[in-house]
Amino acid sequence: MAGCSSGNEPVTSTGAGSTSLPGITTRGLGTVTRTPNAVTVVIGVQTRAQSAKGALDANTGKATALIDVLKSKGVAAADLQTSQLSVNPTSDSATGRITGYEVTNQVTAKLHDIGAAGGLIDAAGEAAGDAVRLQQLAFSIDDDSASRAQARADAVRQAQAHAKQMADAAAPVPIEPGAQELAVMVEVVYAIDQ
């Protein structure tokens, strides 16, 4: 047979499908309790005046005094941020007529010395007077990477213990490989000499 040729068709196999090995899936939870070593304080200054400019000017003076006090109490520039500034009209509830303006300026400060938080709040109150508003106080851990690593390791140990407990309690699962069918289809074209 001269001039015999065939295409490059792929060989396909059909079988029972993929098989997965038996296994156990477990979860573990690790928790670590640590004493916070930082505190974040959100302190606001709120002022009112008949004009927006008057309210802004009054607020600027008190907010500047507040920020100066925070810096003097050891809050680093990187740990000090203006987190909100708003100017809103105030109105008479009966008539709806605008009666003035209210300005709110919030500053977020992070202290790495929790013991200094009380003194800082007192000093902020003295600096801004009746315009001061303590909005939030939240404790945190500065670098929690070691604690997270410990919690993760505890979670893995717990998951491993659960898996071992289940494996010990479970009877072996019988597994039979059975048979798989492999099929190959080929298409061949022959040239015939004349």
Image (cartoon, rainbow, N blue to C red):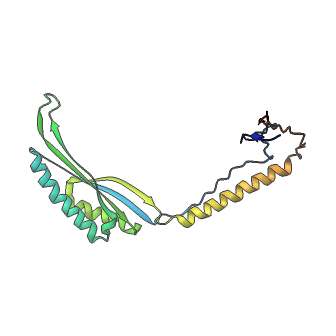
Residue at figure coordinates x 36%, y 68% from the top left: 116
- Res 189 → quadrant: top right
Residue 192 percent location from the top left of the image: 79, 34
Residue 16 percent location from the top left of the image: 81, 36
Can you name the residue that lies furthest to the top here?
Answer: 95
Residue 181 percent location from the top left of the image: 86, 37
- Res 67 → quadrant: bottom left
**Left or right: 53, with 44 as reference point:** left
Judging depth in this view, the residue of 103 and 146 nearest the camera is 146
**Left or right: 71, with 187 as reference point:** left
Residue 179 percent location from the top left of the image: 89, 39
**Left or right: 94, with 83 as reference point:** left
Indicate whether 163 appears above or below 37. above
Residue at figure coordinates x 20%, y 53% from the top left: 131
- Res 190 → quadrant: top right
Judging depth in this view, the residue of 16 and 60 nearest the camera is 16
Count every numbered label the image shows and give the total. Answer: 0
Q: Give the quarter of the figure containing the C terminus.
A: top right
Q: Give the quarter of the figure containing the N terminus.
A: top right
Indicate whether 162 appears above or below 180. below
Can you name the residue that lies furthest to the front here?
Answer: 194
